[in-house]
Each structure stands twice: as C-alpha cells, then as structure tokens.
Amino acid sequence: MAYLLEATNIFKSFGGLEVLKGVNLSLEEGKIYALIGPNGAGKTTLLNILNGLEKPDSGKIFFHGKEITSLSPENRAKMGIARTFQLLEIFTELSLLENVMVALFAKKPWGMLKSLFLGEFGNPREGEIKSQALTYLEEVGLGSKAKELAKNLPAGEQKLLEIARALALEPRLLLLDEPAAGLNHRETRFLGEVLKRLNEKHGLTILLIEHDMELVMNISFRITVLNFGEVLAEGPPAEIQRDPEVIKAYLGEEL
C-alpha cells in the first residue's frame, strides 16, 4: 500500500535521554489519525520531526513516496504539510480575516514579511485574497466574525482560527497539537465536527495529538499509542479501547 506519510524506525535523544525509540508511523491519505499517550511519551517530539522542526538521530520520513527527512519545515509546508501548535500562533491584534490573509500571502515567493510591511494588502489582488480568506473562515464556522480582532475570541474559536490559517496553506496533511486543550465540552464537540467535515469534504489527512478521549474515539480512523518513546499499540478505536496494555499504561478508567 502507498502511504501519504511514513516514518520508519525513528530515534531521538536529548541530553542522553531517549525520547523516541524506533517509532514507526504510516498514514493513509484521506483519513484521521490520533497520537495518544501519557505526558512525556514523545508525542510532540514525533510531530516536530514530522514537520521538520526537529531532526531524528536516525530513521527516515517519507511524504507521498519522497524522502523528506532533511527538508526544512518551510519546504515541507510547500509539499503540503501544515502544522498547528499547542500554544496558539495567531496574530491577536489583527482581525480574523487579516490573520488568514497573512497565511495566504505567506505562500507567495516574497512571503509574509513583505505582505505585512510593504503594503501588500493594498495590491490589486487584495479582493481575491480576501475572498479566499473568508472561504477558509467559513470552513471552520467563523465567517460571520471575519472582521473581529483575534484577541477577542474565546479559546475555542482561536483554535478554529489557527486551523483556518493552516488550511490557507492548502495542505494534504494537517498536524494538530492538542487542538482541544482548554476547550469546554461544547467547543470540543464542535471542533470534532469541523475536523470530520474537512476530512470528508476535502479528503484532508489529519494527525492529531490529543488527550480528550471522547474526541479521539469519535473521529479517528486509527490510533497510535506512545509510551516511554515506543509504540505500545496501534489500531482502530474499538481495538485500542479494549487493549489491556493501553488501559494499564494510559486509559485507566477513562473509558
């Protein structure tokens, strides 16, 4: 089977501490995957390696059949890998629309800085860019708030704005780091609906790190469980829920 992304035999250490120990991960295109495990299991380090923020000590990363192990995050983004972070990366003093427009301009050869500082928002394509930005906001349910300042949004909607900005990069793979962190139950349920809609409507492949097990079990095609830097289990949600080793190491009485 040809996978959209493959990580093979990934090892990573920091200061003599092995964080990842021979991790393998394979993602089919057009599916939603979850990466779960206790704090310190190596989940965020693995995500950092997948999008190029960290380099593995050994092992390889392939995207659509091409090895990308040595590529920068910028080059991986150009290939179609977008990432959101546990700590929000939005521009709080800009409107929602402007936040997404910045992401759209960042795709241009001259990049985001010229867009911000050399008056790019006033160019003849501004109307087209605004229309595209509004479309991405509508995709995540924020179209009616396009002119509001990002700093005035509640936490759940700020997370959705970050996803809209990532969508502006037109990714094939979206990496999400704890998108439901800090959200209430209603916000988390709506987030799950948005992710499922993006997956079903656009065939977007999604990999998320998440601790909210209701969200994970409701939207995931397959789940990978990390424990002390190793893959403890991998499979569909129903199988993971019943796995005695996963229950012992992580799920406990949650489910």
Image: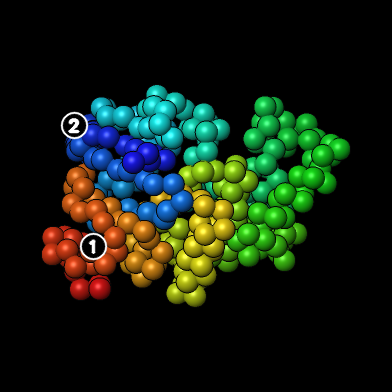
Q: Amino acid at mark 1?
A: Ile
**227 displayed left or right of 126:** left
Residue 37 image label? none
Task: Please say if 65 is above or below 86.
Answer: above
Q: Which mark is residue 240?
A: 1
Q: Residue at x 59, y 43 (%)?
A: 170
Q: Nearer the viewer, residue 184 or 108?
A: 108
Which residue, as the protein is rendered here, is positioned at the far right? 124
> Residue 249 versus residue 238: which sits nearer the camera?
238
Residue at disc 2, secondary structure: loop
Residue at 29 percent of width and 60 percent of height:
236
> Residue 208 placed where, x, y %?
40, 53
Query: How busy is the neighbourhood of tag 1: few (under 14 within 10 Å), some, or many (20 plus)?
Result: many
Indicate the quadrant containing the N terminus: top left, top right, bottom left or bottom right.
top left
Label 2, residues with CA under 10 Å away: few <14, some 14-19, many ≥20:
few
Q: CA distance from mark 2 to mark 1?
A: 31 Å
Q: Residue at x 77, y 49 (%)?
A: 130
Whichever of labels 2 and 1 marks the residue nearer the N terminus, that label is: 2
Where in the figure is residue 145, as x and y percent of width and height? Answer: 71, 64
Rendered residue at 32%/56% (across/down): 222
In the rendered view, does 187 fall on the left or right side of 43? Answer: right
Tell which of 16 and 8 is nearer to you: 8
Which is more foreground, mark 2 or mark 1?
A: 1
Toward which corner of the image does residue 214 lie, by quadrant?
bottom left
Q: How is the image coloured?
A: rainbow
Q: Which mark is residue 16?
A: 2
> Position of 216 compared to 224: left or right?
right
Q: Is residue 24 above or below residue 57?
A: below
The amino acid on which the numbered mark 2 sits, given as a three-letter code, is Gly
Q: Is residue 82 visible?
A: no
